[in-house]
Image (spheres, rainbow, N blue to C red):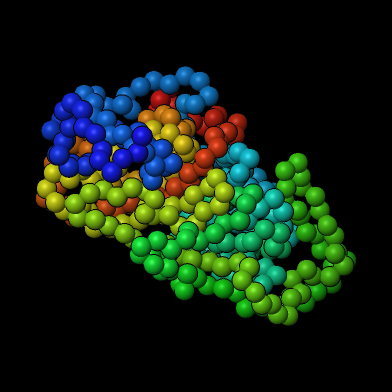
Amino acid sequence: MESFVHLRKGRTPKRLHADLDGLKDDELGRGGFVGRTANIYRRHDPTAYRASGPLRPVDVMTSELKPSDATDAAGAPLLLFSNSDCRISLSRRSEEMPFYVRHVDGDLLSFVHRGSGRLETEFGPLRYREGDWVYVPKATTWRQVPDEETTLLMIEATAEFRVPPPGPLGRHFPFDPSQTTVPEPEPIDDDGRSEYEVRLVHEGGPTSLFYQHNPIDVEGWRGDNFPFTFNIADYNVIASESVHLPPTVHLFMQATGVAVMNFLPRPAESVPGTERPPWYHRNVDYDEVSFFHGGDLFGIPMPPGLVSHAPQGVHHGAPEKARERARRKFDEQDRVGWYVISVDTTRRLTPSAEVLANDLGQHA
């Protein structure tokens, strides 16, 4: 049961996630990292296993995947993972869409891994660049016009994406909404074609609507439901000198059953004995998908474009050799240099056939 006093049994370090003296730090927690918790201290690396079956962790390089929109202007993003709360897809578009799109099953939140361009939306045009989050409300009509090949990680939630409620740090930390870019209305004239296709993206779809006028014909709007962009360079990272903080402090946006987090460069923990890499865990109530944008973890490069899926209840974390290196280099390195986007879901995610076919087999 929950208690103000946490029990200690057997050999345990005095400080949390620190001074392990050869033990392996394994956290068993409920509700992500905010519920009841047990920190278990093991002799061996809990991620040193071989897996067989549907809950096997999956790692895939997105550069090896082939969404149809990469080679066909009329193509679509490639589904990576899905459950009843969300769909996670990959787009690699270099040509402008010959149609408009309307996601009618839920809000769309896309991360720009590579590329630049603009979105034509009903609310007005939105420029995007590398490192941007692009938010498009459910059923908004839009069209992508890339300046160059653009790689997007797309997260569609069946419920509304919302900014997390303000906690002790207030409304502007870590995500400061005043740093968003909001479009100004800019109607687009007809170009003489006989009709304009609006492709409805939905489960069991798509469906196409055909208009005799350009659907981006909005002269003005008002309200609090609108698209925007936000760049990760404007995200206020929270850090601690004495303990590695849980992923929940890096929460960006959330919907029912879906949490999106930004893990970005920050000062490293500086109190001697503190474990800097995330502790081993099996995140009992969440599946975790990590998308590696780039950077490094204490000198170890993070492979750009790698997607890693850890099903709930299955151990994952940096391997022991990476932890040992972080300890050896403690006095030499004072920053964490990673750029990782994380999507946690309360329902189990199903990897697509394309993801399974390209699994790197690190736990096979």
Most foreground residue, 272 or 92: 272
Q: Tell me if I can see residue 5 in this picture.
A: yes
Locate residue 193: give its quadrant.
bottom right
Residue 210 in the image: state x and y as whole percent: 85, 60
Left or right placement of residue 138 versus residue 110 in this view? right
Quadrant containing the C terminus is top left
What residue do we see at 22% from left, 41% from top? 17
Q: Please, is residue 297 above or below residue 1 in the view? A: below
Residue 116 in the image: state x and y as whole percent: 53, 64
Most foreground residue, 190 or 241: 241
Locate residue 127: give its quadrant.
bottom right
What residue do we see at 53% from left, 66% from top? 229
Left or right placement of residue 22 versus residue 174 in this view? left
Most foreground residue, 78 or 44: 44
What residue do we see at 43% from left, 54% from top? 251
- How many numbered badges does the structure rendering display? 0
Residue 328 in the image: state x and y as whole percent: 13, 41
Residue 43 in the image: state x and y as whole percent: 21, 24
Left or right placement of residue 347 versus residue 18 in this view? right
